[in-house]
């Protein structure tokens, strides 16, 4: 099952830690907020990237990142 | 002018004697509410092809089914009559002229969904008059009228839900949408008041009657607010699919030469003069580079500077940001600054135009609500429709209207 990384734009405080931990999927905009790789709020992940994604999720100080099932349900 | 050869439906009372239909007048005009099973009501709404009138145009039957299906707890019904869009007055006009159509719609969906709580949300100061009409009825599910703060984003559906749950009137992150988890966790149907009034007509007169006017994709009538350079700005009811020009004619026609029309409210998009015959429907306006959104048509006089007027509107939208999401909180003021530099034709204008192109991408689809998307859409359409002016401004040659004050209201609620 494909997983999708999602950022909660209200919870996100623009600390930018996630971009260091998942540089392949997350860039920061000019104000320091994450741009996920579909240019919006979510990014599809390969199975071998789940571990790194979980590390980014754990590192986010405001719990703004989460992993969804492709269909939208929460994991 | 074929547009007026039809009878108003929602505003029938207003059209005949310019008065509000109280309960007696409403019953005399429309008769009592029909008794329909939940399935029969949803089937009628489906066959009628009713789309939401709150801006998105989503099929109403699909929303009803989704809330009915996910029923682990009793659903709540919310009629959204807040009308956060400053250019629009149609919901206020409807609640003023035909409040009982809205209340009928609420009663019908509350019954169909088995809801025991029904709330009519209106702007601050608008509750008392509607409460009088509510008090005259004997609805099985009593309607609570609640006032919501008069800010733009306060009437977005997740903000309404959070406010009516006891929190601040600010949007929340979705999913979950209100239909899944809304007021105090209950599945919540949020429908625009005009949507519910149309639904009340469909319940009485049926889908075939409803489809007698409008387009196959957008059946029925629309309440449209006109403003700007027209003789008689206000609210008119027209068949969906009526051309923009015909609606402006119904509003008395232009007061002076018009160069463009803003459709869809402040988060909508400009239509240039060549697009003046575009039909009022979601599809036709999208193809013309604009949106139906909340149907509003604001006529921009030729003497005005479209870039300057857009800068005023984007500055207003930026001030309405709830400041919760970084790309909206920081992005909208930056977009407004770039646009202002272009409008004033400063030396920085060419650099601002480059920054603006990049920033419009950065503010789109990255907030919890669609406010920044609307601001980006409005700005993009201005750069396109006023492209000739843009070239002059970037060469340091602004037009005559470049320093003018706002033509459209930009007062924060
Ligand atoms: C910033 C913002 C403001 C909104 N304001 C209103 C409003 O004042 N009234 C309204 O009915 N819908 C408003 N909406 C749309 C609602 O979120 C919601 O989609 C609508 O009430 C659903 O009703 P409908 O399906 O009948 O169209 C707003 C949306 C946004 C993004
Ligand atoms: S680490 Fe969390 S708060 Fe910081 S930018 Fe990433 S998502 Fe936002
Ligand atoms: S996108 Fe803007 S207006 Fe909407 S919730 Fe986020 S900060 Fe508020």
Image (spheres, coloured by chain):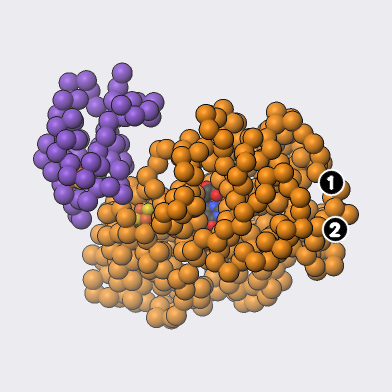
Chain colours: A purple, B orange
Ligand 1 within 8 angstroms of badge 2 C-beta: no
Chain of the residue under the numbered disc 2 shown in the image: B
The answer to whether any part of residue B380 appears in the image is: no
Residue that protrudes farthest toward the right in the picture: B28
Precedes in sequence: disc 1 or disc 2? 2
The answer to which of B372 and B229 lies nearer the viewer is B372
Residue A68 x/y as whole percent: 31, 29
In the structure shown, which secondary structural element does the residue marked by tag 1 occupy? loop
Q: Please indicate whether residue A40 sits to the left or right of residue B218 in the image.
A: left
The vertical placement of B239 against B65, above or below, is below
Figure quadrant, ligand 3: bottom left
The answer to which of B17 and B260 lies nearer the viewer is B17
Residue B364 x/y as whole percent: 35, 49
Q: Which residue is mark 1?
A: B32
Q: Please indicate whether residue B164 sits to the left or right of residue B369 in the image.
A: right
Q: Which residue is mark 2?
A: B24
């Amino acid at each position: 099952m494909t997983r999708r990384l999602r950022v909660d734009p209200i919870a996100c405080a623009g600390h930018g830690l996630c971009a260091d931990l998942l540089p392949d999927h997350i860039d920061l905009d000019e104000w320091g907020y994450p741009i996920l790789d579909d240019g919006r709020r979510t990014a599809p992940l390969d199975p071998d990237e789940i571990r790194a994604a979980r590390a980014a999720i754990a590192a986010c100080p405001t719990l703004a990142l989460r992993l969804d099932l492709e269909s939208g349900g929460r994991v | 002018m074929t547009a007026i050869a039809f009878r108003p439906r929602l505003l029938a009372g207003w059209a005949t004697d310019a008065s509000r239909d109280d309960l007696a007048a409403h019953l005399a005009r429309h008769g009592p509410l029909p008794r329909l099973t939940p399935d029969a009501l949803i089937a009628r709404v489906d066959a009628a092809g009713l789309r939401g009138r709150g801006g998105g145009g989503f099929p109403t039957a699909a929303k009803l089914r989704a809330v009915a299906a996910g029923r682990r707890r009793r659903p709540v019904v919310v009629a959204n009559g807040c009308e956060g869009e400053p250019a629009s007055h149609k919901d206020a006009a409807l609640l003023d002229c035909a409040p009982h159509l809205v209340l009928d719609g609420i009663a019908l969906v509350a019954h169909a969904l088995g809801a025991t709580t029904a709330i009519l949300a209106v702007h601050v100061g608008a509750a008392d008059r509607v409460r009088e009409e509510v008090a005259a009825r004997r609805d099985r599910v009593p309607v609570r009228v609640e006032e919501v703060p008069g800010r733009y984003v306060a009437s977005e559906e997740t903000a309404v839900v959070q406010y009516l749950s006891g929190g601040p009137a600010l949007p929340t992150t979705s999913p979950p949408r209100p239909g899944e988890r809304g007021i105090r966790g209950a599945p919540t149907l949020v429908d625009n008041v005009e949507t519910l009034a149309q639904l009340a007509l469909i319940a009485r007169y049926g889908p075939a009657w409803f489809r007698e006017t409008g387009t196959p994709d957008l059946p029925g009538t629309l309440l449209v607010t006109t403003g700007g350079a027209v003789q008689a700005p206000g609210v008119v009811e027209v068949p969906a699919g009526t051309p923009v020009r015909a609606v402006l004619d119904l509003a008395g026609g232009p007061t002076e030469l018009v160069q463009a029309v803003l459709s869809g409210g402040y988060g909508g998009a400009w239509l240039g003069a060549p697009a003046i015959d575009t039909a009022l429907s979601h599809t036709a306006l999208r193809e013309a580079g604009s949106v139906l959104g909340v149907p509003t048509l604001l006529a921009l006089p030729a003497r005005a500077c479209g870039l300057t007027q857009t800068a005023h509107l984007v500055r207003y939208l930026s001030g309405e940001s709830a400041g919760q999401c970084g790309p909206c909180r920081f992005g909208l003021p930056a977009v407004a600054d770039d646009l202002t530099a272009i409008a004033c034709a400063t030396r920085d204008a060419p650099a601002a135009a480059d920054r603006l192109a990049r920033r419009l991408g950065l503010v789109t689809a990255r907030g919890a609500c669609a406010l920044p998307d609307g601001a980006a859409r409005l700005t993009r359409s201005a750069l396109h429709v006023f492209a000739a002016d843009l070239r002059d401004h970037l060469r340091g040659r602004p037009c005559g209207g470049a320093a003018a004050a706002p033509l459209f209201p930009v007062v924060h609620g």
